[in-house]
Amino acid sequence: MDVRIENGICPKGEAHLPPAKSEVIRAALLFALSGEAPERAVRGFEAPFCDDVLHALHAFSAPVPDAGESAALMRMLIPILLEKRGEARLFLSPRLMERGIYELESCLGAVALRGANTLYLRADMRRDEFTVDCSRSSQFFSGLVLALGGSSRECLVRARGMVSAPYAELTLRMAREFGARIEESGEEYRIFPAGYRAPEALHVSFDRSAAAVFELMNLLGGSVKLPEGGSEQADSAFLRLAGRDEASVRDCPDLAPLLAVAACKKTGETLIRGTARLRSKESDRERGTVDMIRTLGGEARVLEDAILINGRGGLSGGEYDPGNDHRMAFAAAAAAAICDKPVVIRRAECVNKSFPAFFTELKKLCGAGEITEF
């Protein structure tokens, strides 16, 4: 599917957003571990649900879970399966296979076997201490916490070089809601014996990553009303970071493409730091962000662990292929607001990974004729 977005779009109205993918994945796994239906994680929200959420809801309904393209689900499922079964076997997309789990392999002293679309790891989780490198992602820490939080033994997890700390805090909060007993001391987390018990009610917020796309459109001239809440999610930082001459995405890497577009509305240089870790996302998102800005007529370049944008007050527009990366597609769609000509996004169905109703919602907010699928 290709989508044409007219230049100068000015979305107005109330947006309906999907549930927070980061929360639903954790909740679905915790409900399953507590013996409850994972579907409780999306109670109160209407379909369609994104691909990552669907894979999480069905993770334990087949002998071999399918993580699809969700790195978060893969990295959390592996320790859980090892704790429950002594081995972890998952179906993965080719791109997800490339993203790697060497941090878990090093932590557990085991090397995974990799097939065309299958990953297999056997490791002994019956130990008292775990040390995991979290300098690339906090998801490795989250997986260990979820796996051990309901166990019958006391364990110590050491998290080295934590990035995306808000997501680690989210994991700790949700595990505790299900009965986990965890004490923190710096980089060390002591987990005491406990069994998971599903709470009577669990609040899942709307997705602040999706909200940030419309927050960007509002900065570029739109007037979209968004639901309140979700302030504990890392991507709630968008409005705080947008417009700054220098910002860091160390704890909120998904915001980098959106911040880059916001920088193009300004005149002068904007430096986005902490971007090296974007190279191992759904695409090389560091290079991809620069390529998107250049393709749409702007000026940007990659520095060491940073992206530098030279804003000119707008962009020219044109055709853009996000390389199957949903975050890049969202950013390009928002960029149309400051373009001199329409933006055509090739292979735009990649938004299904996190927000399948995105273009439907955008059509509603922009009006007939502004958004065309072909």
Image (tube, rainbow, N blue to C red):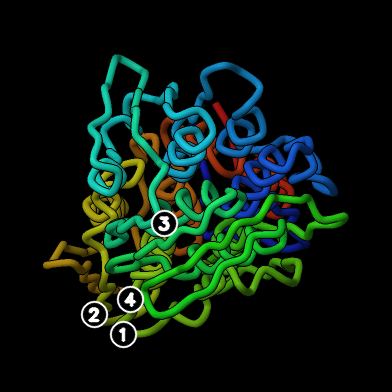
Q: Which three-letter amino acid code belongs to the residue tagged 3?
A: Phe
Q: Which three-letter amino acid code belongs to the residue tagged 2?
A: Glu
Q: Evaluate whether residue 143 shows in this view.
A: yes
* Contact check, label 2 and label 3, Cβ < 8 Å: no
Q: Which residue is mark 1?
A: 245
Please tell me whether mark 1 or mark 3 is closer to you in this view.
3
Secondary structure under badge 1?
A: loop
Q: Quadrant of residue 286?
A: bottom left
Q: Is residue 298 left or right of residue 346?
A: left
Please tell me whether mark 4 or mark 3 is closer to you in this view.
3
Please tell me whether mark 2 or mark 4 is closer to you in this view.
4
Q: Which residue is mark 4?
A: 248
Q: Earlier in the sequence, mark 1 or mark 3?
A: 3
Q: Earlier in the sequence, mark 2 or mark 4?
A: 4
Q: Distance from label 4 to label 1 (Cα)?
A: 11 Å
Q: Evaluate whether residue 319 shows in this view.
A: no
Q: Distance from label 2 to label 4 (Cα)?
A: 15 Å
Q: Earlier in the sequence, mark 2 or mark 3?
A: 3
| Residue at 69% over, 47% down | 361
Q: Earlier in the sequence, mark 4 or mark 3?
A: 3
Q: Distance from label 2 to label 3 (Cα)?
A: 36 Å
Q: Earlier in the sequence, mark 1 or mark 2?
A: 1
> Residue 182 bears which disc, if any?
none
Please tell me whether mark 4 or mark 1 is closer to you in this view.
4
* Contact check, label 1 and label 2, Cβ < 8 Å: yes
Q: Distance from label 1 to label 3 (Cα)?
A: 32 Å
Q: Is residue 301 left or right of residue 223?
A: left
> Residue 269 bears which disc, if any?
2
Q: Which three-letter amino acid code belongs to the residue tagged 1?
A: Asp
| Residue at 21% over, 64% down | 299
Q: Which three-letter amino acid code belongs to the residue tagged 4?
A: Ser
